[in-house]
Amino acid sequence: MKKICFIIASFVSMTMSSQVSAVTPTPEQLNMFMQLPKAQQEALAAQYGVDLNSLKQTSQTQQASPSLNELNGERNRSAANEDSTTNNNQSFAESMGFNESSVQISQINVGDNQIVRCVPRTQATEEQKAELGSRVMQPKIAMLEDIERRKSEQEEPLFSDDFYCFAEKNKQTRFSLKNDAEEALKPFGYDLFAGEPSTFAPVSDVPVPNEYVLGPGDTIRVKIYGKEAQDYSLVVNREGDVDIPKLGPFSVVGKSFSDVRKELSEEISNRIIGVRSNISMGELRSIRVFVLGEAYKPASYTLSSLSTVTQAIFAAGGISDIGSLRNIQVKRQGNVVAELDLYDLLLKGDISGDVSLMAGDVVFIPTRGKTVAVKGSVTRPAIYEVKQESSVREVIKLAGGLLPTAFGDIVKLERITTQGLKQVVNVNLRNKRIQPVQNGDVVEVSSTLDTVEQSVTLLGHVARPGVYGWYEGMQLSELLPSIHDFNPQPDLNYILITREDPLTGAITAYDVNYADYLRYKSEQSNFTLGAKDKIYVFNREEERAFSLRSVIEQLQKQTTLAQPPKVVKISGAVRNPGHYPLSVDATVNNVLRAAMGYTQQAELNFVLLARINQNTFKTELRYIDLNSSEQLKLAPLDRLFVFSKNEPRDELIADLIEELGLQATKGFSQQLVTISGDVRFPGVYPYVEGMTKDMLIKLAGDLNASSYMVNAELTRFKSDDATRAELVHSVIELNEEVVLQPLDTLLIKRIPEWRERRTIKLAGEVQFPGMYVLQEGETLSSVIQRAGGLTDLAYPMGAVFSRESLRIREQEQIQRLTKELESELATLSVDKSDDTKSVSAAEAQRLKDRLTATTAIGRLVIDLQALWDGDLRFDLTLNDGDELYVPKISQSVTVMGEVQFPTSHLFDPDLNAKEYIESSGGLKVRADDDRIYVVRANGSVFRPSSGWFKNNEIMPGDTIVVPLDTEYRDTLSLWSTATGILYNTAIAIAAINGL
């Protein structure tokens, strides 16, 4: 829009400067300016001091006048411009009728049930963007002409430079009687002159008819052969003669070509002995005729002397929209010599009225006579000019007759009465009574209804879907007699049938277990069909609820306050959870069959039913025992919850619990109960009418093996709903039937001293490695004795003991350090100092990657050697999940960290730590020689107070760690901690992997 305003401002400036220069605004600029709103035109003209009337005159004078050869093309373009609402200079937004000042969501209907909604990009609020949702995006460019293609694509995004736009279905109810898809009627026959050439002078080799009358200007070609050969071109002079060499003048005026040819041949044969002649026409004369009246360009035209009435009309650009096609007159010397009805030419191919013209003739086209419009189910809907046609039947015959789909029993005739009012008359074409037509009448022939009467429709996973004939007493087995009538893998346990009420259009659902019929020929499963029934057959794939979307939507649309939608929902451990039609007399088993039954882990004994009380509009719960012979009939909007045996129930019923909590009011407590203690899934559950403690226990997944079976504790909330409330605790016997109340809490006790199975894993150099079950308070030494003790190759000093609680703690520390390293990396990326002693970002990134890939071990340092030697001070009490790895005797010492070549060396009792480091190539520049430490094989760490381990003995399996000097980690304060974790974890993993 800003670009358009800039161009127009430039144009106005050019117009002002035209008073002193020769600059002239272009037609495109004038066209753009004239398309602006009138108020904006006046504002721009006032701003630049330009006369608005002069601009309009300039716009008119710059339009070139068409030549005769361009008349028809110009007419076609002007007609197209009248129907067009956009031009090449308009943006998509402008062509849609939006302006830059709009801040509200705008919409345009682009077809039947289609709508385009747009929001200005620069002015769309957050709320408007939220309403559009994910459709506010940067889609591919779509121009205006793509709308037709996008009509059928619901919510397909469109694009313009100024607006966010998207197409969607128009869900508004349309009460208009006008059919949007119906095209405007056009007068019949006028397109005959569209797109044709504007000159019809015949070419030179066209045969001249015998009745052609010669006149001045025509050329006669005479060929003489025989004794002598001559070729003459003789032009008829003004006196009507031709001068023949050696013979003199010969009069031909007013004679036909056949007479001239005969007489002249005889004259030549008689006067010249020994020759014969051949006479033909050469160039023909031109004639000037007048095309007047309602021609598109009435004027006088110079035509060929062979021209007819239609050719003269074509030369004048055709007939205007108000001209008559049925009463075209040819006048000669003031008298009407011929009349032409173009309908004979268009409808019958009769050209007898298309007479040849003579010089001075006048082709007069009067205004159009009486017209009658015919639309609907006819061959050629159009506006017809009537002449002899006086009845509805004759007018329909003029329109090509009725289509096969026409409904002739009621034809609507719309006319204007003498009082100026519109009147509709029904005409039955089956009656012989003649209904006359008047000028301006509109005849509308309706089509037959698309509805197929006395039929049923078979849909879905069948071999031959389609519409089939219906008769009274027809059964489903007549459509589907065997398994071969289905596609592979059909679901025969659930076939849905919908029946439409003939008066209201409301549908009712039925379902059939057709497998019983195919197996046992059970007549109860052989459903008796009704007229217009629809049969839906499903496969055994998932997403069945999605396939039923159209049926569910129709059931929801026919909802009233007194009649909620006949839809039920099933959730939980079924193969196809979702919404399903509520069939007649349906029970839980019907819905389970619709959902393709349970999953493998489903609870098979009961389901939970949530129902809305139609009197109180509050949700009530029912406990449905599936083992009971009596099954409750379902009601509209029922919700079924099928639990899994091995999964918690809180997620499945979370929304239901919230719903029950919100509907509590004064005098109506929350319909909730709580169970805690030794059950599989303790928590809050819906209160079921008549609920017992056994129902609640089953809802909670039943008792555990450790549950105390004698009694339980029941806590009940009591209130007088006025001034006081209290909690009452009571002990109930589990073998008694106890009815619960809302807000009760049931505590299931655990058997005293009950312990879950706890184990420890022994691996490596023990006599009998494996998983050992622990007693309460059992120690490590006791389990080792039960395992037969250590082998002769065991190295107790290198034992690795891990504990789950420590592993979890270490893993949390690793995750915390990883996040802190990410922050340090961000600092390093900003720090551009040239300090060569700083840790580089690449080094820090490598450290972070190693730390991320590290898995915690949870190692607890123990002295297994001392314990094995009998020192019980080093014994420890075991927990569930503990693991002990006892390696073989180690003969190596490992050096790692800031050394030239980190590696392992064969243990030498005569070497100290410094000598082992020298064996690894010595220290790196960044090594911290004051903080070198040794990790013993059992995980303990020591570092001497001074010197280089002169007084500390290196043992087999030890690891010497040379850390990074703190002087070189100023920019990464976590380096030491992170590398320490990596070193210690690597040592433990190496010990375990060495088993």
Image (cartoon, rainbow, N blue to C red):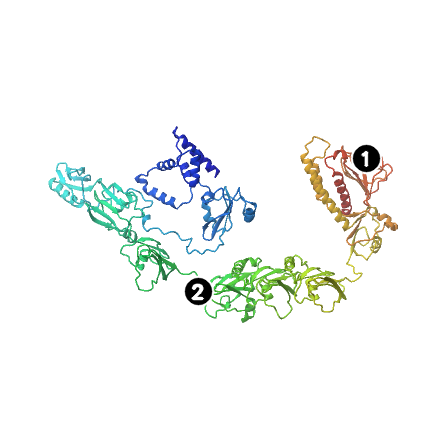
Residue 202 in picture, x, y percent from top left? 26, 42
Residue 470 in picture, x, y percent from top left? 46, 67
Closer to the camera: disc 2 or disc 1? 2
Residue type (three-letter) at the residue carrying disc 2: Glu
Q: Is residue 942 visible?
A: yes
Who is closer to the viewer here, 895 or 420?
Answer: 420
Residue 289 in picture, x, y percent from top left? 23, 42
Category of crowding for the residue at label 2, using alpha-carbon neighbours closer than 10 angstroms: few (below 14), some (14–19), many (at least 20): few
- Give the Cα separation between the discs numbered 2 and 1: 100 Å
Category of crowding for the residue at label 1, using alpha-carbon neighbours closer than 10 angstroms: few (below 14), some (14–19), many (at least 20): some
Q: Which of marks 2 and 1 is nearer the N terminus?
A: 2
At numbered mark 2, what does the secondary structure look like: helix, strand or loop? loop
Who is closer to the viewer here, 775 or 883?
Answer: 775
Q: Is residue 203 visible?
A: no
Does residue 73 lie above or below 152 as drawn? above
Q: Residue furthest front?
A: 723
Residue 612 in picture, x, y percent from top left? 60, 63
Q: Mark 1 points at which residue?
A: 930
Who is closer to the viewer here, 454 or 63?
Answer: 63
Does residue 59 lie above or below 391 as drawn? above
Tally the marks: 2
Q: In this view, does 934 lie to the left or right of 822?
A: right
Q: Residue 729 carries which label?
A: none
Residue type (three-letter) at the residue carrying disc 1: Asp
At numbered mark 1, what does the secondary structure look like: helix, strand or loop? loop
Q: In this view, does 373 lie to the left or right of 789?
A: left
Q: In this view, does 455 lie to the left or right of 190?
A: right
Name the residue: 73% across, 46% down.
Answer: 812
Q: Which residue lies furthest to the top in this view?
A: 20
Who is closer to the viewer here, 910 or 495?
Answer: 495
Q: Which mark is residue 453?
A: 2
Does residue 730 lie above or below 815 as drawn? below
